[in-house]
Amino acid sequence: MKKIFLVVLLSVTTLFAQQFKFAWLTDIHIGYPTASEDLNQSVQDINSFDDIDFTIVSGDITATGTLEELTTAKSILDQLKKPYYIIPGNHDTKWSESACTDFIKLWGNDRFNFEFNKIYFVGLHQGPRMRMADGYFAPEDLRWFDSLFKTKNDSAKPLIFITHYPLDESIANWYEMTRRLKTLNTKVVLFGHGHANKIYNLEGIPGVMGRSNLRAKELNGGYNIVEIRNDSAFFYNKNNSNNEYNKWYSLSLSEKFQFEDSRLPDYSINDTYPLVTIKWQFNTGYTIGSAAAIDDKNIFVGDASGKFYSLNIVDGSVQWTFNTNNAVYSSPEVASDYVVFGSADSSIYCLNKSNGKLIWKFKTNAAVLGSPLIQENIVYIGGSDKIFRAIDLPGGKIIWEFSGLNGFVESRPVISDDKIIFGAWDEHLYCLDKTSGDLIWKWKGDREGIFYSPAACTPVISNGIVFIVAPDRQMTAIETGTGKQLWRTGKYQVRETIGISENAEKIFIRTMNDTILALPASGDLNQPIWITNCEFGYDISPAQIVEKNGVIFYPTKNGVIYSLDSSNGKILWKHKITNGFVNTLTAIDKDQIIVTDFDGNITCLVVEK
């Protein structure tokens, strides 16, 4: 018995006998006014310590994820004398002009794993990728994480897990990671996002939030130094303005944690509306960040692996697939025998909708995240190379290009008579002559900064008026002929989600808290026709509202789909299909819709008669 105790004691002593330190940087935000200077100072400060063995960087490397910002960050971080390990944060993924692919091109990966002194370090981000929503661990990333722990020996390794968000409801599927970590020898979870040193209890798992590298109210930026010594981890705040670093937290690494029961999403709302059922469901295994297109027999959609699918609309069986060379976040458009979409591999594709054969491929200078609009055999689409194009549908030849953008395009344009209108991530809404591509007008809101751009909203048009909602919480009506602003209101606290009735007489908007309402499509700001309290809470999803046969559909950021009578706003049914992001729905009719989501599911949801 004494020998067994001695062996156990020696193993624990050996595990924590070697002391080591690492630096921990997070929330760098290159693109903010002092960010480059702050990071330079931190890198030089870290280099001044001979006993820091490596650096962890836990996300929000940039302000908006542009290649320029990422390249600047890398050029500074590469000055570190010791190795560093890095993941992106939501600022690097949500506003990414490359669909999160430039990060991988620069650093080789957007996740990491390594072992140091018998402790396993795993870093994995949770987006959200391209769409404003809660964080979300992608299905492809969860598979990668699982692949690291195939044996009992792998699972027994002391683990320090690094992500960007805290593992709570700020990540829509936090439970997927916490239940995994509870089966492993997890010692602590490190994350940023909150810009402050703070302690968390993550269902019994210790969590530590790190300060931002930005200087905030201090004269200089800073970071954390983490020391592993004996059986404990010690956290020190290090400001670049002096040589001192002060311990602010310590954590035992030998303690046996008492895990709390996992808090899981509530799907009981589905019991209230039992007539709403899943007719069929197909899972691609990868994040889907775009809406599906349909015709009478087919469903078309792409995923983050770069694969594009045609499914049978009746039973969801795969009819054909086509592989691009990077992620697809562009919602396709179908016209005649053609299906068109963009890819992050920088190309626009036109396929034969019947067999998936390539008809033409148009190469651009950057990722194509915008969704196409097809009218009269012309494809209209914007790209991340800051060019909006008109392309001949049958032949794939360029008709005209507009290169006056200062940001990328991610939404679908709309057409009003001879004008085409769309937003970009450069603060502006654009109106071009659809025949020549000449600029007719551009509009900008009254709040500065690209985060307020009307770029994720698909505009709606009625009677010569274009209506938009933007992240500035304002709804705006603009005359399509002149670009004159007719009215603008912040009364309803809107954000990016809008829709229009099939007869173009009503505008539907979702507020950021609980309600959906209908307004007259008018050049005057009138009182709402109806307001419905849907009780969905705080919602920032950019999914649009669609109407079909007098019924409107909208999915929240946490996967609850609402169906309302468009005439009076009465709730017809609710159905929760996931706890994560759902793209703009595609309605077959008022009782049958196609749903795509971050889980990689393509689902046919029906209302039984």
Image: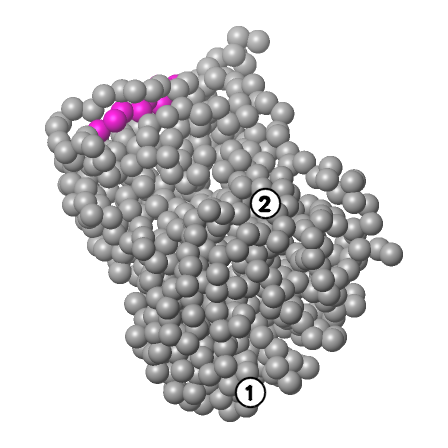
User: Which residue is pictured at 43% across the width and 73% down the height?
Assistant: 480
- Residue 376, labelled with which disc? 1
Quarter of the C terminus within the rendering:
bottom right
Mark count = 2
The location of residue 31, given as percent across then percent down, is 25, 52
For badge 1, the amino acid type reads Glu
Question: Compared to 269, does 527 lie above or below?
Answer: below
Looking at the image, residue 233 sits to the left or right of residue 602; the answer is left
Please name the predominant secondary structure of the magenta segment in the image.
strand
Q: Which residues are magenta?
A: 230-238
Marks 1 and 2 in Cβ contact (< 8 Å): no
Q: Depth check: give the residue in front, 486 or 301.
A: 486
The location of residue 255, given as percent across then percent down, is 48, 17
Question: Compared to 108, does 299 lie above or below?
Answer: below
Tell me the mark number nearer the camera, choosing from 1 and 2. 2
Q: Depth check: give the residue in front, 63 or 570.
A: 570
Residue on which disc 2 sits: 515
Looking at the image, residue 74 sits to the left or right of residue 255; the answer is left
Magenta region includes residue 550: no
The location of residue 63, given as percent across then percent down, is 31, 50
User: Which residue is pictured at 63% across the width and 42% down the height?
Assistant: 533
Quarter of the N terminus within the rendering:
top right
Residue 597 appearing in the image: no
Residue at the top extreme, as displayed: 2
For badge 2, the amino acid type reads Thr
